[in-house]
Image (cartoon, rainbow, N blue to C red):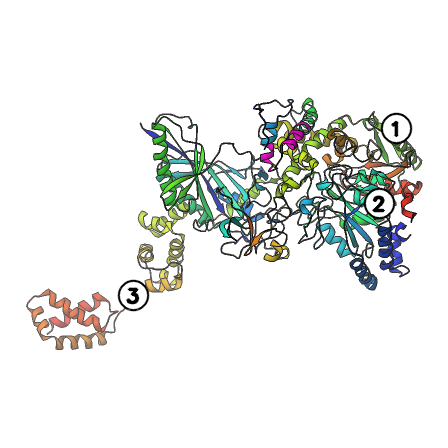
Amino acid sequence: MNYEPVIGLEIHVELKTKSGMFCGCPADHFGKTPNTGTCPVCLGLPGALPIPNKKAVEWTIMLGLALGSTVSEVSKFDRKHYFYPDLPKGYQISQYDQPLCRGGKIETSQGTVRIHRVHLEEDTGKLQHAMVDGKKVTLVDFNRSGVPLVEIVTEADIHSADQAKEFLKKLHQIVRYLGISDADMEKGSMRLEPNISIRKVGETALPPYKVEVKNINSFRFAAMAIEYEIKRHATILESGSIPAQETRGWDEAKNATVSQRSKEEAADYRYFPEPDIPPLRFTRGYIEGIRQSMPLLPDERKQKIVKEFGLNEQQATVLIDDERKLNLFESTVLSNAVVSAGISGATVANWIINKVADYGVATTQQVAADIVESQKITVIDESELQNVLATVISSNDKAVADYKKGKQQSLMFLMGQVKRQIPKGNTQQILDALKAALDTQ
Amino acid sequence: MLIDLPISELSEKLRSKTVTSVDIISECYDQIEAHESKLNSFITLVDRETAIAKAKAIDETIATHASPLAGIPYVMKDAYLTRGVRTTAASKILDSFIPPYSATVHRKLEEAGAILIGKMNMDAWGHGASTENTDYGPTKNPWDQERSAGGSGGGPAAAIAARFCSFGIGEDTGGSIRNPAAWNNISAMKVTYGRVSRYGAIAYASSLDTMGPTAKTAQDCAYVLETIAGVDPYDATSSPKPVPPYTKEIGASSKGKKIALPSEFFGDALDPEIKAAIMEAREVFESAGAEVTEVSLPLLEYGVPVYYILAPSETSSNLSRYDGVRYGGKRSLFTKENKRRIMTGTYALSSGYYDAYYKKAQKVRSLFISEYTKLLSQYDAILSPVTPIMPSKFGELLDDPMKNMMADLYTVTVNIVGLPSLSLPCGFGKTNLPIGMQLVGNMFSESTLFALGHTYQQKTDWHTRQPTLVSSK
Amino acid sequence: MTGSTDTSSNMTKSDPLTTNDIDKIARLANLPLNEAQARELTEQVGVTVSYVSELQTLATDNVTETSQVTGMENVLREDEIDTTRMFSQEEALSNAKRTHNGFFVVDRVLEEK
């Protein structure tokens, strides 16, 4: 039987604001001593009240604009209730029926993937398992609690693992180019949750189940998890059953997904409008202002470097894939040193793609100097050149004689001898002078 | 007694050094030692030495304090976080909770130099109208110790009536500051929603909760409100509107003021003694030149249903944080009434019922807003009783959810709309139990209400009457 | 939970609650109830619910909901760190019953969320 995968993605991105979503605690929580970055608000103390972070709201709108979403004129926060030890208030402040952005899309080589919505919420604390005094316990650290978190939800428009991967790469690139998140998957600042089901080719209705996969910390694993699920579902469907609606986790060690929690009782989050936060209303002018302040997106920058600096498609793609390379290229190609030496964009691109080892430490100034140096054409002082030629000719009688007999290799040998003494010499100038000197012998 | 004096006078005496804060505080503690055991108004009493030490410090620096509240003793309902001083919300869940931060209201009062002497009894988490639903034993009414001091803020009200302190800070979600004021013969201002910061006050129902003063007179309440009101960067719902100089504007004349008397408040549910007292008050206002007109507020009967959807829903959410992980004890320690409200609210918000209950109540809330707005566009204030019944005997309200709900009949609609309401003593029943009335005004019209209340208290002496307990030994 | 044998939880708004409903709500509310409490709450919450259902008689077809009465909008803070409110680790943990090496401690949660 032929099946078609039906895949939707939920992606959480931690914003790199200075402070929290609803309080002034530092948003940078990674690697900090546990429970040292908290206040009444993010620790969920009695009486604490949330105040939303303006920048987090702006950045979410910016992401929406980059994805072609419609920014809601009126938006609000809602409370989403569930009990878990990493959720200090027993509810997460999130957005329910009036998200900041709706709609939008990302084009992939296998078709358009529509964005369902983009909304803003707060992150939870972090749990880790441990043994304390011989007892199995869970330790809770609230440093991450209240960090701004954007959730991007797609429509179930994805039909293969490769397409999912391409989508995710593009989204990752957009987020990075907007400068709103590190989107570092290993640190958990970008988290992926595919919803997967499959149906017979030709069917159009959504399958009567879906499986959500969590704990994925790379695009590769996302693709592997999707492949794994597609096969697993097919086997179950072939046997005449329907896969269970459940949440599974990706197990790196087993290269497999494992069941985590079956949703026997559908979650009931009891959303209601957050009474502690007045609603948000955005004027067209405000949204336009954000659009104006938006940095260029990956596709726009690609077109720009192709057009302005004459790069080919392949060079441009390599640079765009890594913003550090792209930034280095743009600053280098426009540097005084490179511009005044008249070096082409293609040359700069090739150098950066092939010769720069560490993009983390390379400075524009150094790279520009290296490129100019590599391209340097030095005009040698004529008398100095004649002295060197005289020395070389007089000390290589055999080679000179061979040349006279028509052996071109000897010319190259002699050329090498000269170059050894004047390494920066203009090759053409030296060659011309060498030939002339030999001819007059 | 010094503590009988209005705040303005006490403050003057402190400044002229004819009285010291130590004198006032000592008198309060003597009074507490003599009578607290009969009332059970405190959950946590600040120890005498600590309070006296603070008073001494204020006495020494009195000239440098701008606030008239410097050196004045006060109490807070135990719903306010007070850094370093235990805060329980009258629940065993928080029995050992020592807050690591202070509510904005507490911070402002400390900065003003007022002296906190205790954290007061209440219905646990604000759930109740009789201070019986507390894990620390009921607070008894100073006027009759067989009866409830009202609720949820019975503790602060009883303490003021018993002259344990000069003023109190209450919290009103559905009547919690006005109902005890009425039953203890004291005054209280339920402020406009957003007038006073909620930061650091334990939330009952976030969209209804208001933080306000309670004291012997409208004027004392004005002094306190002037200090605690204002926008707070830590409360997104606090209003940026400037705080009027209430104590300066309190002398405004009541002549020509228009007062509405909605007939729906005077139906069968109302005790005839209370009705009679309100009618007398009407005459007092008329004699002061105000114009009192009977009007209609047909939605009134829907106030309790709206309240008993919104408040339990929001409280079920607000009380979710008490999971025993970061502070406090287990959820099994919630009282029966707490559990009733949490369950009711959880139900009203649950999938399939949200539209029929929570959303419906929010719509009816809009109807209330337009009905009140319309009425208050023609009147300066609405005069009504605070409670339909005289102070209840213990047990009467506790186990009967219907009776419990109906006690809030006259107070809850004000919270639903967000309006301010001043509760004032206006008479006594045959058995010498106090009766209260309320004046409800437009959003942010506290100044108008204070002036009306002040006029009334200059023409009457109900507010000066004390329970016999005060002077007994 | 209760040992109720009541299986019907399908009800319209005016029906009384069943102990099954109460069990479900108690799970959502994370309230441990014994059988007697569940029985009592079934009745009492039922009374409240049917009383507040009185609202259904009011027409609200073209009425929008009010969630907040302040009329305020766009109350936001600048993206700045506020150290004045931050707790030391010791303060953060000061009211917790169980701590370990700077962490709060709970019984092992088995499933990942």
Tell me if label 3 and label 2 are in contact, CB under 8 Å.
no
- Reply above or below: A428 against B379: below
Tell me which corner region of the image, top left, top right, bottom left or bottom right, holds residue B269.
top right
- Element under disc 1: helix
Q: Magenta span has A82?
A: no
- Element under disc 2: helix
Q: Magenta span has C42?
A: yes
**Prevailing secondary structure class for the magenta stretch in the rendered image:** helix
Percent from the top left, x then y, of residue A225? 38, 40
Image quadrant in which the N terminus of chain C is located: top right
Tell me which corner region of the image, top left, top right, bottom left or bottom right, holds residue A57.
top right
Left or right of C81? Residue B184 is right
Q: Nearer the viewer, residue A194 or A59?
A: A194
**Subunit bearing disc 1:** B
- Reply above or below: A196 against A389: above
**Subunit bearing disc 3:** A
**Residue assigned mark 3:** A376
Q: Residues within 10 Å of mark 2 (few under 14, many from 20)?
A: some
Tell me if label 2 and label 1 are in contact, CB under 8 Å.
no
Q: How crowded is mark 3: few (under 14 residues within 10 Å), some or many (20 or more)?
A: few
**Residue assigned mark 2:** B38
- Reply above or below: C60 against A344: above
* Numbered range of the magenta stretch: C25-43
Q: Nearer the viewer, residue B233 or C13?
A: C13
Q: Which mark is residue B272?
A: 1
| Kind of residue sitting beneath label 3 | Lys
